[in-house]
Amino acid sequence: MPDHGGECILELMQALAQPSPSNDLTPEPTTPDWWRGAVGYEVYIRSFADADGDGVGDLAGVMAKLPYLASLGLDVVWITPFFRSPGFDHGYDVADYCDVDPLHGTLADWDALAVRAKELGLKLFVDVVPNHSSSHHRWFQQAVADPTGPYRDYYVWADPAADGGPPNNWLSHFGGPAWSLDPGGSGQYYCHLFLPEQPDLNWANPKLMEEFAAILRFWSDRGADGFRIDVAHGLTKDPALRDNPVLRPVLPGMHPQEAFQSFQHIHDLHRHETAVLFRQWRAAVEGTGVILLGEMDTRDVPRFAEFVADGTALHAGFVLQVGLGEWDPAHIIATMLNYQVTAKGGCAWEVSNHDQARAVSRYGGGDKGLGRALALTALMAVFDGMVFVYQGEELGLPDAVLVGPVEDPMSSRSGEGMWSRDVSRGPMPWTDGPVNGFTTGPAAWLATMPVPTSLTAEHQVATPGSTWHRYRELIGLRKRFPALWQEPFELVEQGREHIVLRRGSLLVVANLGAQPVAVAALAGLPVVYTSGDQPVGAFVPAECTLIVDTSAREPAST
């Protein structure tokens, strides 16, 4: 019997994706600040949807699922790298920034995707990787072949230390020194803060800005509405290549992330010069309407603000230290308020991405983890800045259960038993058919246990009250209530684990703690949204964010 599940879900998605003129409060596309009220969605392309049956997600697969994304009420779709790449880091090692890897399709596929996205009212963000290229890129190949040629200075080179070893104590995110010897035999080392196959680009060379300005124009001319900038907190390096201060000893058997965090990264990352550099990026996209969104893995909030706060560099940066850590309500609230005040709206909030364990699992698993993820995402939706959902988050997916070899190079190259980012990269479960409907082929690129029917998109879209419908309601808050991002942010009350704030006539109460909290101002007001249970009188349920409308108290005008 033929499986018509994919056809049914597509028909339902197309119906849901139809705009509702009476309730369409989306900012006009030409409004420069449209992004401030936007909700985005990260597509990890390898695992989203495979259209050609080879087991790897592709652009045609993304296009086929655009009605699904539009039906959620999203504004932006960010797609992880699909450029030509040897794939050592699954696309984040780019060999050609202006072409599509055959594994993911063709330029014609991108062009068709861009047209269809516009028809559905979706904006597309391309994931550009400027901190490093692939060692297969022609720039690096020529830099190795000709040490006196013009491409040598496209990368960071240094002579050995006095003992013949690496020039300093910098480590790679993926384990071991951040330096490898020149394969051309010059005796110098080249810097790579990630894999040896990902040599760092030298942004002290103005030629790099010329190259990337052309890359940004190439994709914006082909329909890109913005760019997610990988490792935006990196790029520039200390000219003297000084050692990073040591915070703790690096011990045998440490996970690469633990070893990396044993240093204070003041000379290889988080530098003031990088914030200045992004003013040139902003100038390169001036007049195009393109949005620049940085991956900002910095815990220094004033430094983060340098990149975004004055409106001359990045439009916004991802805040990674709030949603991507463990469940710690007091830390979450205090940190979010710090960013709210300091970054002046230049934040992009998320609770999951392709580099971390999924929020449901990190936050305690099951209904507890899901409730916490919903409560925090709802709180993020009423703070200034963009909000992003990671693929499968709208289904309440936990970490994938791996049943095959580890594919994440950070783990596979560091020995058995190392935690792997693969747990967040399992194939998207569209149906309860073979390989959960991700591919028509026999297997996906990443071998994982099938998920139950209750966690598939087909089941949840067709089931009122499912997690998918709860996320659809949450994602629609900013369109339903523009005050949540347009009206001034007023802090009314701050407890250790709860917060009360006002945006126009809307009062927002987020109780992230484990016990109900009494908020006197809440009593008697109509609840227009809750991430969990309804309040009982003035008591806000535990681990819940709700919104009430204070205008209901105001006497009707005569």
Image (tube, helix red, strand yellow):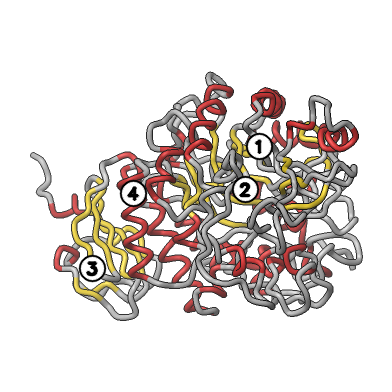
| Disc number for residue 538 | none
Q: Residue at x 84, y 64 (%)?
A: 444
Q: At 86% across and 38% down in the image, what residue appears?
A: 144
Q: Earlier in the sequence, mark 2 or mark 3?
A: 2
Residue wearing tag 4: 340
Q: Give the label on residue 15, or none.
A: 2
Where residue 358 appears, as percent x and y from the top left, is: 59, 68
What's under tag 1, amino acid-wise?
Ala
Question: Gap between marks 2 and 3, in whole Å?
Answer: 43 Å
Disc number at residue 495? 3
Point out residue 385 in the picture as x, y percentages from the top left corner. 42, 44
| Residue under numbered circle 1 | 117
The x and y percentages for residue 25 are: 42, 38
Q: CA distance from mark 4 to mark 1?
A: 31 Å
Between disc 3 and disc 1, the foreground one is 3
Image quadrant containing the N terminus: bottom right
